[in-house]
Amino acid sequence: MPPGLDTAWVESLGGWFHVLTAVLVAVDAPVPPVPSELFVIGSGAMSQLGSVALVPSIMAAWLGCWAGDVGLYALFRFQLTGLLDRASWGQRIHRGILRLLDKAGPAPGYASLFVLRFVSGGRTASMAAAGIAGIPWGPFLALSGIGSAVWSVYMVGLGWFTGSATGLPFWASAVVGMGLGTLAGLIIAGIVAIRRRSGRGDG
């Protein structure tokens, strides 16, 4: 593939690429299978190539992540899940969120708003749990905002580093970056599980 050809479609979108990224990251909160990470990590790889700007890539990921967090939190805090149940696709989303909540187990507290977003499905479970628990808006917005910012810098930076180190096309760098991110998420999930078991043992 000629150099630059694989990023031509992104360059044709212009600023709309960042809008699309933000929307996908926001939707990824209630619907984890949405491949938002591919766009976020890919934007980091493309910024290394000069196809997109680095700061707008981070800002798009951050705004989308924060907006998705707030939307999912509000959905459960104000008990609006009945709106999802009005449509078959909404019922599937609702069931998926409940399965993630059941799998995640009891929320470990405010730290979950920051840490669990790095674990597969953890963002969805922690935001829904925060809404159900009625965590106050102030701490929620602060921790969610900071967590979203750190996640965005990490994911975009992962794409930038992978693209710089491998020299692969942006999409291949994004796939490699997703693999590394998944590995890091498994490590974090393991640490969280060990801490929970230790906590139950202390009780």
Image (cartoon, rainbow, N blue to C red):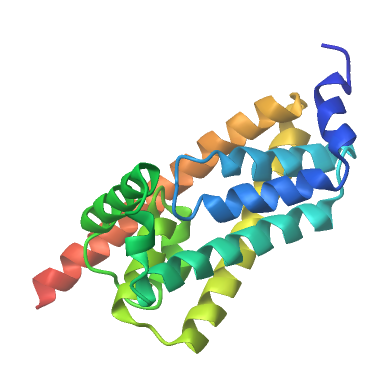
In the rendered image, residue 67, in percent from the top left (x then y), is placed at 59, 65
Which quarter of the image is occupied by the N terminus?
Answer: top right
Of 95 and 163, nearer the camera is 95
Which quarter of the image is occupied by the C terminus?
Answer: bottom left
Question: Would residue 17 appear left or right of 193 to someone viewing this image?
Answer: right
In the rendered image, residue 143, in percent from the top left (x then y), is placed at 52, 77
User: From the viewer's perspective, is residue 183 above or below residue 106?
Assistant: above
In the rendered image, residue 117, in percent from the top left (x then y), is placed at 46, 59
* Residue at (55, 68) in percent of width and height: 147
Of 81 and 114, nearer the camera is 81
User: From the viewer's perspective, is residue 39 above or below residue 77?
Assistant: above
**Quarter location, residue 55:** bottom right
Q: How many marks?
A: 0
Question: Would residue 76 appear left or right of 115 to someone viewing this image?
Answer: left
In the rendered image, residue 150, in percent from the top left (x then y), is placed at 61, 64
Of 141 and 182, nearer the camera is 141
User: From the viewer's perspective, is residue 139 above or below residue 77?
Assistant: below
* Residue at (52, 70) in percent of width and height: 70
**Quarter location, residue 80:** bottom left
* Residue at (17, 63) in percent of width and height: 197
Residue located farthest toward the top when viewing the structure as drawn: 1
